[in-house]
Amino acid sequence: MRKARRVESRALKSTQADSMEFQNNIIGTDDLVLVTGAGGFIGPHLVESLLRHGLRNLRVFVRPSSNFRKLQEIVAEQGKRARIELMQGNLLSREDSRAATKGATVIFHLATGNGNSFPDAFMNSVVTTRNLLDASVEHGCLRRFVNISSFAVYSNVGKPRWRLLDESSPVEQNAGSSRDAYCFAKVKQDELVIEYGKRFAIPYVIVRPGSVFGPGKAAITGRVGNGAFGIYLHLGGSNPIPLTYVANCADAIALAGLAKGVEGEVFNVLDDDLPSSRRFLRLYKKHVAPFRSIYVPHAVSYMFCWLWEKYSRWSEGQLPLAFNRSRWHSEWKKTRYSNDKLKTRLGWTPKVPMAEGLDRFFTACRERGQNA
């Protein structure tokens, strides 16, 4: 297996932390922090957040095939005040995982599989996480493992309409048979992290972002609807969408890795002033591009998912299980959300208001000529 390659910025010590006192954090400003999946959508924003928090010793891990131009810009800009090591490799390699985790006191694990198949999702989310955890146990210097999970793991079944979904809500127990590969992999990944916490005393925190949005991610979240049939089916209706602006999400992840006394806890990440699905779609059409859509009432969408699921199983998978009742409960059932725990336990507040975040998102989509 190919050895991990390193590209380092110049290491010059800063005379003072940028913006934050470290007396309430589990590490010091010069302790090594690892960010995996740093070339993804959230990764560069997390690196910038950690630098704003005064950290001066970062290792950012990316796949060789990743587009890490933004990270290179950060390295060039921050090289005089922080040591940022850009490492390329593959976490499926135990050797690369050992190299990545060597000396790391906090690991922010953002890397995940994007494939549609269950084996690919399992390999690139669960096996890679196991390799990181095994390497961390071997090194023996880890202070916290921050696993980035997803709202997709919540089942949301058996609750009355408008029931609150929060960190105490049950997760999907049958993800392998009724949900998509991503949900399956994230459920198994969380289970693995919890298991290592019990068996090897790995101090962990699980962070579950809602629908992360912002410039650079043009697609409309599936919680609003689906455009696969040539006309956009609006499925969300009056449901609030659990959106979190990418920079706000990155700040929450940073705090989850640094704050004292939160080991073993789960934090959902979503912003204030959540728009309804209907309002989001209306704003998107107004500020980005108009397109035709049809609203599908909840009772009708549930019946549609049930029929699709039934035919998919009757055809033995010839029709992919793109719509099913588990997904309906997770994404389109009337639900309300809370970020109270994130605020009270971590002291987090969204720095970018929802209106401003949406404006930035719509502007970026419009400039790229994106539509539904």
Image (cartoon, rainbow, N blue to C red):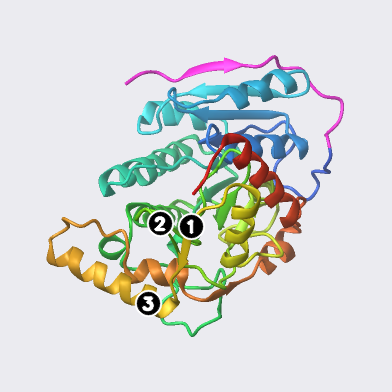
Judge whether residue 139 can be spotted in this image.
Answer: yes
The reply to whether dot 1 and dot 2 touch (C-beta < 8 Å) is yes
Identify the main secondary structure in magenta.
loop
* Mark 1 or mark 2: whose residue is earlier in sequence: 2
Mark seen at residue 292: 1
**Which quadrant is the N terminus positioned in?**
top left
* Amino acid under disc 1: Arg
- The residue to which callout 3 is attached is 300
* Mark 1 or mark 3: whose residue is earlier in sequence: 1
Q: Relative to 342, say whether 304 is above or below.
A: below
* Amino acid under disc 3: Val
Q: Residues within 10 Å of mark 3 (few under 14, many from 20)?
A: few
| SS label for mark 3 | helix
The residue at 68%/28% (across/down) is 57
| SS label for mark 1 | loop
Front residue of 43/280: it is 280
Q: Residues within 10 Å of mark 1 (few under 14, many from 20)?
A: few
Spatial CA span between label 2 and label 3: 17 Å
The residue at 41%/82% (across/down) is 158
The residue at 62%/41% (across/down) is 366
Residue 38: quadrant of the picture: top right
- The residue to which callout 2 is attached is 231
The residue at 64%/57% (across/down) is 283
